[in-house]
Image (spheres, rainbow, N blue to C red):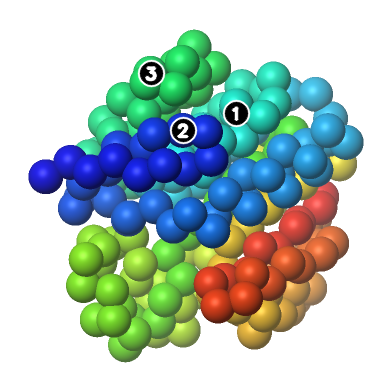
């Protein structure tokens, strides 16, 4: 059954094949829109987009074009419909596939938004209404976060940036440690915002 949720000034449709949009994640859209003003010219990438709400709210606040990626085909269908309903379809390219494979080797982006699954596998039963693939981040919750970081490091331009959503401040610290230890990684943590009772947003800079 399809439901609709108000997200900023958007009406976002979704069903039980995708993660239920969390209203607090509008903060990710807004922070990304503020930060992108200082980014180089060029399109923006969104990883693990789900119903597309975070990226679409960002697009409505900026003039940038968006390439949005999800491994769930149903999510991509819903994201395309939401982009059309928001009047943003001409600026949003929705791609279905593995984030490591769906982007061209030479594609580069000025900025990115990412919301990968970040719950530990042992904790996913607390959210039975959400598809397992949308919340299960592996044994430590960071399996898809690490993949996202590798993709971002490969596809962001020099001087680009990103806003990554994670579970909490401890995961934000783990992101900083991973990037510090990764050979040749260009990205580094530039700031963190913890949204009380919800999650953490990590500003990455290349």
Asked if residue 95 is positioned above or below residue 135 in the image, the reply reads above
Q: Secondary structure at mark 1?
A: helix
Residue 182 lies, in percent from the top left, at 71, 70
Quick check: 170 left or right of 190? Answer: left
Q: Position of residue 62 (x, y in %)?
A: 69, 26
Percent of width and height locating residue 11 = 39, 34
**113 or 199, which is in the foreground?**
199
Labelled disc at residue 59: 1
In the visual, does 32 lie left or right of 147?
A: right
Q: Quadrant of residue 2?
A: top left
Q: Is residue 130 left or right of residue 101?
A: left
Which residue shows up at 72% across the image and 48% down it? 31
Does residue 136 lie above or below 45 as drawn? below
Circle on res. 10? 2
- In primary-sequence order, the first of circles 2 and 3 is 2
Q: Nearer the viewer, mark 2 or mark 1?
A: 2
Q: Residues within 10 Å of mark 2 (few under 14, many from 20)?
A: some
The residue nearer to you, when weighing 114 against 5, is 5
Secondary structure at badge 2 equals: strand
Residue 178, placed above or below residue 32: below
The residue that appears at 60% across and 28% down in the rendered structure is 59
Q: CA distance from mark 2 to mark 3?
A: 11 Å
Tell me the CA gap for discs 3 and 1: 12 Å
The label shown at residue 84 is 3
Other-residue count near label 3 (Cα within 10 Å), few / some / many at <14 / 14–19 / ≥20? some
């Amino acid at each position: 059954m399809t439901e609709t949720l108000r997200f900023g000034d958007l009406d976002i449709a979704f069903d039980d094949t995708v993660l239920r949009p969390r209203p607090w994640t509008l903060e990710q859209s807004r922070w990304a829109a503020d930060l992108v003003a200082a980014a180089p010219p060029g399109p923006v990438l969104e990883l693990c987009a789900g119903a597309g709400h975070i990226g679409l709210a960002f697009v409505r606040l900026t003039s940038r074009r968006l390439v949005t990626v999800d491994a769930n085909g149903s999510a991509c269908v819903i994201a395309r419909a939401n982009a059309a309903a928001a009047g943003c379809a001409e600026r949003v390219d929705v791609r279905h596939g593995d984030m490591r494979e769906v982007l061209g080797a030479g594609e580069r982006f000025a900025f990115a938004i990412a919301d990968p699954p970040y719950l530990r596998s042992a904790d996913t039963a607390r959210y039975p209404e959400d598809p397992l693939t949308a919340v299960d981040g592996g044994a430590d919750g960071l399996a898809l976060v690490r993949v996202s970081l590798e993709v971002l490091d490969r596809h962001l331009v020099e001087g680009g940036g990103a806003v990554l959503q994670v579970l909490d401040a401890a995961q934000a610290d783990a992101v900083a440690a991973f990037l510090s230890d990764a050979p040749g990684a260009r990205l580094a943590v530039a700031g963190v915002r913890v949204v009380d009772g919800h999650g953490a947003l990590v500003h990455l800079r290349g």
